[in-house]
C-alpha cells in the first residue's frame, strides 16, 4: 500500500512528538545518577532517600535506551556516560592513592609497622582530599607533618608523596579538557606521514605547525595568524597546508575571495604532496565551499574522505562524517535524517560519549523545528544548550555556541510565559560571541529576536529600532553572499526581518515608514514561509547551518566552485549580489543604507513627474498579511494591513476572482478553462450584476478605503499601482469605487502597473530628447510559434509590416535590429507567452517568454528576459522601441496565480516578459494580466491599442480610452465581456519624455 507524502509527513511529525513526550517522562524518573549527585552535593545520608526510587526505575530506564531497532530516550541513554563522568574524580583519587601507596611502599621495602602506617596515612589523605582548595592544602601539610613524626627516617617519602599527590590532583582537575569528543580524538598532525612527523618533532617545527593547524580549524582562527607566520621553514610538501591555514584565517575574517583563492591554489598540487595531506587540504576547502553554499562542496568532501582513511587521520575523517550528517539533518527527508540520528545515537551509546549524545539531541531539536514543533524543540533546547554565561565550548565548531543560543531564543519567542531560560540573555550572550561584520546573518537574527522580545515586553519604540537595524543589516548582507544556495538560506532571515519590521511599523501608525519598508521589500526576492510561529526558528536554523560570513564584493570563482547564474542576474536591481536602488519616501531615508554607493530613487519626484493628480498604491505580501500604503496627490500617506490567511474575506474574495478568470485549475484542460470562463461572472454569458458584484467583493477586500474615497472625488487622475506577485492579477481598473455603485476606477483614473522602481530605474534612457508628432506602427510579429490557433489576430490594422511565424530566435533578433535606427515607433508582439514545463514548475518566470518556432528538441524557442536583457557588453543586446503592444497569455510576466494561504504566498517581484521589455529600452508597454483568447473582441482591442499608441502623445491615456470604450460597450449592450478588457495593463515610466 502506497503512503502519500502528506501521510508520511504526518507520521514523522507524530514520531517526533512522541519522542519529545516520552523523553520528558523518562527525565522525571530517578536513576543511579541522582544518587551519585546527591552524595556529592548533600552527603550519603541525604542520598539514601533516592536509592529505592533509582532501583525501581532501573528496568524502565533500561527499556528506554537506544537499541539497533529503535531510537531511545536521550535521558535514558545519558545515564551511563554521565555516571561515568560523575565517578571520574573518585576513580582518579583511587588511582592516585593506590599509585602513591605502591610506589613509596616499594621504595621503603621491607616495611615495618611505622613505615606502613606512614605510607597508608599519606595514601588515605590523598583519597579523601582529591581537590585543590585551601582546606586541601592545610590537610596535606598536616598529614605530612604527622607522617614525619610517625617515622622520622621516612620524611623524604612523606614530602615526595604529598608533592606527587598534589601534582596528580592538579592534573586530574584538567580531566574535562583532556576528554575530547569522538570527532576531536587523534593527533592534530595525524595527516602528516609518521617519518615526516618525527623529523618535524626532532627539529622543533611540529609545535608551531600543530598550533597553527589546531587554531585555524577551530572557532578561534583569528588566533592562528602568528603561528601560521612562524611556519616558514616547513618542508615543500607541507606548503599546501600553510596556504590552507591562511585561507581559513581569511575566511574567518570574512574575506571570502582571498580564502577561496588561497584554498584553490593550495589544492593545485604543484609539488609532491602526501595523499593524507591532500585529503586534509581538500577537507578544509570543502568546509569553505559548504559554508558559502557552493554546489561542489559534497564532491570535494567525498574526495577528501577517500584520502583520509588512515587511522592517524581519524580526527578529520570523523569531522567530515559529522558535517555530512549535519547536512543530512538540514536538507534530507525527515525519515532519512532520523536514521542518521539513530546511527550516531548508537555510536554515542557504544562509546559512552556524552558529546556525541548531546549532538544527536540537538539534531532532534532541529528536526522538530523543521516539522513545525517549535514548542517541543524549546523544551529540548532549554536543557541542552549552554553558554549563556558567555563562555564558548572548548571543542565547539565555529560559532556553534552562539548559533545554539540564538536557536533557543528563537523558539522561546512564542512561549515566553513557559520559558525556563531567559531568551534576552541568550541573544545578548550570542551577540557578544560573534563578529557582526563577519557573521551578518547571525547578527541580523539576534537583532530581530531583540525586536520581538521588546515588542512582547511592551517597548514598541525600542522594538522598532531593533527591527529597523535587523532589516537594514539583512538587506545589506544578502548582497554580500557568493552563491545562490547561500542567498536562498539568507532569504528566510530576510523575510522574517521584513515581517517583523512591517508589523511593528504598521502598529506604530507611521505611514511613511511603512511605505519605505514596503518599497524595500518590493525590491527583494523573498521566499514563502510555512507560518509565523516557525519562521523565527527556521531563520535561526539557517543562521546556524549557513555559518554566513560577509564579503566586500561579489566573488569570482572559476572551475567547479562557481555557481551557474542566469544572464538576467547582471541587472542592477535584479542581481542577487548587487543592491537595488533604495526608494526614498519624503525628504530622506528612514532606514539607513549601509552601502553608500547604492543609488537612490526619490519616490515623490517620480510620482510628480507622472502627473499633477497622481495617486500611488503599493503593497507587499509577507506571510499571511498584505501591508499597503497609499499616497494622495498632496503627498499624504496612509497605510493598513489586510489578513490573507485561509478563510479571511480577502482570501475568499480572491478565490472567487480566480475562479472567474482563465487560470487553469489542477487537472483542468484548455477547453475546460474556456468553458469555465464563458460561464463565469466575467465571461461572455455573465450578467452585469454578477460582474459588478464579484469585482465589488474583491475591491472591498483589497482596495484601500482612502484610495477609493479619494478617487470618487477625482476626475482624470492617474493611479500608479505597485503590487507584488500575489496581488498582481487584480483587475484594478475595473474595481467599483464603493458598494452599490457602478463607478469604476477607470472612470476616474488611468491605471499604471509599476514593477519595482528598480526595474524602471535600470531601463536604458532614450538617446534623444526630441518629441515626435507620431509613433508609427512599423512592425508586428504575430503568432511567431507558427500555428494557426490565433488566425483572427494575425492581421492587425495600422501596422506597416506584419511578420507571421514560425520564427526562430535569430529571426526575431534580425527583425528588431533592422528597425533599431531610432526608438520613436510602436512594436506589436502577439503570441503565446509561457515557460517550459520544468521552468514553470520551478516558478522561474524569468524563463517565461514569447513562444517562437520549434527548437529541434521537441519544444519551442522562446524570447525571454535573458534574450532581451543579456549581460552588459553583449553583442546580442536588443534596442526595443519606446512603445510596445504585447498581447499574450499573461504577458506582464507575473506567472500563474498564487493561493493566498500560508506557505504559498509569494512575496517577491515579478520579473517576466513585461519587465524585460521595459529593461530592454521600452518606455510604454501594454501587457495582459492573465490568459487572453483570440477572438473578435481581442482583435478590436488590439487594433485600438495600436492606433492609440501610434497617434496619442500619452500612451497611458490611450490605454484608458480603450478600456473605457470596452466598459461602455458592456454597460450599453454587453457586446464585449469583462475578462477581455480587464486583462489590459500598462507597464512603464508613466510619463512622456
Image (cartoon, rainbow, N blue to C red):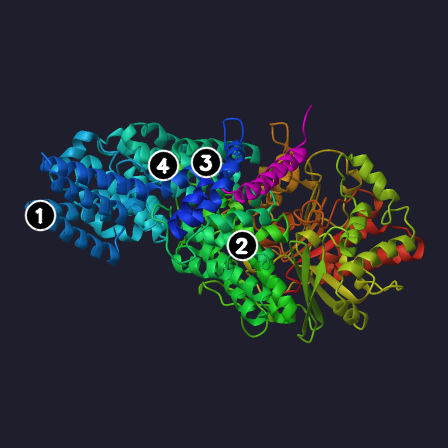
User: Disc 1 and disc 2: Cα gap in Å?
Assistant: 63 Å
Q: Quadrant of the C terminus?
A: bottom right
| Residue 410 image label | 2
Residue furthest right as drawn = 973
Q: Residue at x 80, y 67 (%)?
A: 748
Most frequent secondary structure within the magenta stretch? helix
Q: Earlier in the sequence, mark 4 or mark 3?
A: 4
Between disc 4 and disc 1, the foreground one is 1
* Circle 1 residue: 155
Q: What is the secondary structure assignment of the residue under circle 1?
A: helix
User: Disc 3 and disc 2: Cα gap in Å?
Assistant: 23 Å
Question: What percent of the width, then of the height, locates residue 113?
Answer: 13, 39
Viewer-side residue, 377 vs 917: 377
Name the quadrant containing residue 106.
top left
Viewer-side residue, 354 vs 290: 354
Residue 886 visible to an observer of this rendering:
yes
Dot 2 alpha-carbon crowd within 10 angstroms: few under 14, some 14 to 19, many 20 or more: many
Circles 4 and 3, Cβ within 8 Å, touching? The answer is no
Between disc 4 and disc 2, the foreground one is 4
Q: Residue at x 40, y 60 (%)?
A: 432
Magenta range: 1-30
Dot 3 alpha-carbon crowd within 10 angstroms: few under 14, some 14 to 19, many 20 or more: some
Q: What is the secondary structure assignment of the residue under circle 2?
A: helix
* Circle 4 residue: 182
Between disc 1 and disc 3, the foreground one is 1
Q: Earlier in the sequence, mark 1 or mark 3?
A: 1
Amino acid at each position: 500500500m502506497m503512503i502519500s507524502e502528506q501521510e508520511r509527513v504526518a507520521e514523522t511529525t507524530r514520531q517526533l512528538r512522541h519522542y519529545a513526550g516520552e523523553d520528558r517522562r523518562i527525565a522525571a524518573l530517578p536513576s543511579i545518577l541522582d544518587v551519585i549527585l546527591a552524595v556529592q552535593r548533600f552527603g550519603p545520608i541525604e542520598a539514601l532517600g533516592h536509592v529505592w526510587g533509582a532501583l525501581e526505575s532501573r528496568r524502565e530506564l533500561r527499556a528506554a535506551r537506544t537499541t539497533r531497532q529503535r531510537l531511545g530516550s536521550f535521558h535514558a541513554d545519558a545515564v551511563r556516560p554521565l555516571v561515568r563522568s560523575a565517578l571520574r574524580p573518585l576513580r582518579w583519587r583511587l588511582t592516585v592513592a593506590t599509585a602513591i601507596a605502591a610506589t613509596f611502599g616499594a621504595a621503603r621495602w621491607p616495611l615495618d609497622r611505622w613505615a606502613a602506617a606512614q605510607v597508608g596515612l599519606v595514601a588515605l589523605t590523598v583519597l579523601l582530599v582529591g581537590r585543590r582548595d585551601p582546606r586541601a592544602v592545610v590537610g596535606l601539610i598536616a598529614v605530612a607533618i604527622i607522617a614525619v613524626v610517625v617515622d622520622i627516617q621516612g620524611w623524604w617519602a612523606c614530602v615526595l608523596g604529598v608533592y606527587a599527590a598534589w601534582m596528580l590532583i592538579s592534573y586530574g582537575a584538567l580531566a574535562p579538557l583532556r576528554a575530547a569528543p569522538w570527532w576531536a580524538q587523534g593527533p592534530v598532525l595525524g595527516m602528516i606521514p609518521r617519518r615526516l612527523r618525527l623529523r618535524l618533532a626532532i627539529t622543533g617545527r611540529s609545535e608551531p605547525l600543530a598550533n597553527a593547524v589546531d587554531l585555524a580549524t577551530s572557532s578561534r582562527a583569528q588566533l592562528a595568524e602568528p603561528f601560521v607566520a612562524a611556519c616558514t621553514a616547513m618542508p615543500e610538501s607541507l606548503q599546501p597546508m600553510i596556504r590552507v591555514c591562511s585561507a581559513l584565517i581569511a575566511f574567518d575574517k570574512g574575506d571570502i575571495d582571498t580564502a577561496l583563492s588561497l584554498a584553490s591554489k593550495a589544492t593545485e598540487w604543484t609539488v609532491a604532496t602526501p595523499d593524507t595531506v591532500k585529503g586534509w587540504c581538500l577537507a578544509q576547502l570543502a568546509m569553505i565551499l559548504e559554508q558559502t553554499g557552493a554546489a561542489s562542496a559534497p564532491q570535494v568532501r567525498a574526495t577528501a574522505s577517500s584520502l583520509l582513511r588512515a587511522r592517524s587521520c581519524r580526527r578529520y575523517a570523523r569531522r567530515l562524517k559529522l558535517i555530512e550528517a549535519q547536512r543530512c539533518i538540514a536538507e534530507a527527508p525527515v525519515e532519512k535524517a532520523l536514521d542518521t540520528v539513530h546511527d550516531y545515537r548508537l555510536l554515542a551509546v557504544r562509546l559512552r560519549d556524552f558529546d556525541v549524545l548531546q549532538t544527536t539531541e540537538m539534531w532532534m531539536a532541529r528536526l522538530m523545528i523543521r516539522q513545525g514543533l517549535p514548542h517541543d524543540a524549546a523544551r529540548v533546547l532549554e536543557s541542552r544548550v549552554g553558554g549563556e554565561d558567555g563562555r564558548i565550548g572548548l571543542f565547539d565548531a565555529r560559532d556553534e555556541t552562539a548559533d545554539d543560543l540564538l536557536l533557543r531564543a528563537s523558539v522561546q519567542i512564542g512561549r515566553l510565559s513557559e520559558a525556563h531560560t531567559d531568551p534576552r540573555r541568550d541573544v545578548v550572550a550570542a551577540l557578544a560571541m560573534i563578529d557582526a561584520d563577519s557573521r551578518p546573518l547571525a547578527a541580523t537574527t539576534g537583532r530581530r529576536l531583540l525586536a520581538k522580545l521588546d515588542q512582547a515586553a511592551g517597548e514598541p519604540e525600542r522594538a522598532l529600532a531593533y527591527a529597523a537595524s535587523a532589516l537594514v543589516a539583512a538587506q545589506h548582507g544578502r548582497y554580500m553572499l557568493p552563491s545562490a544556495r547561500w542567498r536562498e538560506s539568507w532569504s528566510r532571515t530576510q523575510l522574517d526581518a521584513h515581517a517583523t519590521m512591517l508589523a511593528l511599523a504598521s502598529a506604530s501608525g507611521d505611514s511613511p515608514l511603512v511605505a519605505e519598508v514596503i518599497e524595500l521589500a518590493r525590491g527583494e526576492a523573498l521566499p514563502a514561509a510555512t507560518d509565523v510561529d516557525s519562521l523565527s526558528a527556521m531563520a535561526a536554523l539557517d543562521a546556524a547551518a549557513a555559518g554566513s560570513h560577509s564579503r566586500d564584493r561579489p566573488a569570482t570563482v572559476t572551475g567547479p566552485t562557481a555557481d551557474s547564474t542566469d544572464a538576467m542576474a547582471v541587472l542592477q536591481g535584479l542581481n542577487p549580489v548587487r543592491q537595488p536602488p533604495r526608494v526614498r519616501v519624503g525628504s530622506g531615508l528612514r532606514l539607513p543604507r549601509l552601502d553608500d554607493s547604492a543609488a537612490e530613487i526619490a519616490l515623490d519626484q517620480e510620482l510628480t513627474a507622472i502627473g499633477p493628480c497622481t495617486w500611488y498604491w503599493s503593497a507587499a505580501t509577507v506571510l499571511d498579511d498584505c501591508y499597503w500604503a497609499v499616497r494622495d496627490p498632496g503627498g499624504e500617506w496612509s497605510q493598513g494591513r489586510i489578513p490573507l490567511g485561509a478563510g479571511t474575506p480577502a482570501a475568499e474574495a480572491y478565490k472567487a476572482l480566480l475562479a472567474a478568470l482563465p487560470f487553469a485549475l489542477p487537472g483542468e484542460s484548455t477547453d475546460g478553462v474556456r468553458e469555465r470562463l464563458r460561464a463565469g461572472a466575467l465571461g461572455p454569458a455573465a450578467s452585469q450584476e454578477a460582474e459588478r458584484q464579484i469585482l465589488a467583493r474583491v475591491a472591498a477586500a483589497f482596495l484601500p478605503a482612502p484610495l477609493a474615497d479619494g478617487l470618487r472625488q477625482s476626475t482624470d487622475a492617474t493611479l500608479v499601482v505597485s503590487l507584488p506577485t500575489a496581488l498582481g492579477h487584480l483587475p484594478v481598473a475595473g474595481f467599483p469605487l464603493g458598494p452599490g455603485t457602478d463607478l469604476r476606477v477607470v472612470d476616474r483614473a488611468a491605471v499604471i502597473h509599476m514593477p519595482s522602481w528598480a526595474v524602471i530605474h535600470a531601463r536604458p534612457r532614450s538617446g534623444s530628447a526630441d518629441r515626435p508628432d507620431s509613433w508609427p506602427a512599423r512592425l508586428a510579429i504575430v503568432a511567431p510559434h507558427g500555428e494557426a490557433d490565433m488566425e483572427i489576430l494575425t492581421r492587425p490594422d495600422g501596422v506597416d509590416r506584419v511578420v507571421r511565424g514560425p520564427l526562430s530566435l535569430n529571426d526575431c533578433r534580425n527583425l528588431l535590429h533592422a528597425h533599431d535606427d531610432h526608438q520613436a515607433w510602436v512594436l506589436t508582439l502577439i503570441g503565446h507567452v509561457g515557460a517550459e514545463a520544468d521552468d514553470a514548475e520551478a516558478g522561474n518566470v524569468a524563463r517565461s517568454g514569447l513562444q517562437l518556432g520549434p527548437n529541434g528538441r521537441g519544444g519551442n524557442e522562446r524570447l525571454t528576459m535573458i534574450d532581451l536583457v543579456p549581460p552588459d557588453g553583449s553583442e546580442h543586446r536588443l534596442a526595443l522601441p519606446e512603445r510596445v503592444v504585447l498581447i499574450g497569455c499573461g504577458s506582464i510576466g507575473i506567472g500563474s496565480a498564487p493561493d493566498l494561504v500560508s506557505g504559498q504566498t509569494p512575496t517577491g517581484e515579478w520579473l517576466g516578459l513585461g519587465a524585460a521589455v521595459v529593461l530592454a529600452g521600452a518606455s510604454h508597454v501594454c501587457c495582459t494580466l492573465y490568459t487572453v483568447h483570440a477572438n473578435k473582441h481581442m482583435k478590436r482591442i488590439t487594433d485600438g491599442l495600436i492606433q492609440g499608441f501610434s497617434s496619442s502623445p500619452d500612451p497611458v491615456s490611450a490605454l484608458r480610452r480603450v478600456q473605457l470604450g470596452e466598459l461602455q460597450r458592456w454597460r450599453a449592450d454587453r457586446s464585449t465581456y469583462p475578462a477581455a478588457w480587464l486583462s489590459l495593463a500598462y507597464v512603464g515610466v508613466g510619463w512622456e519624455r
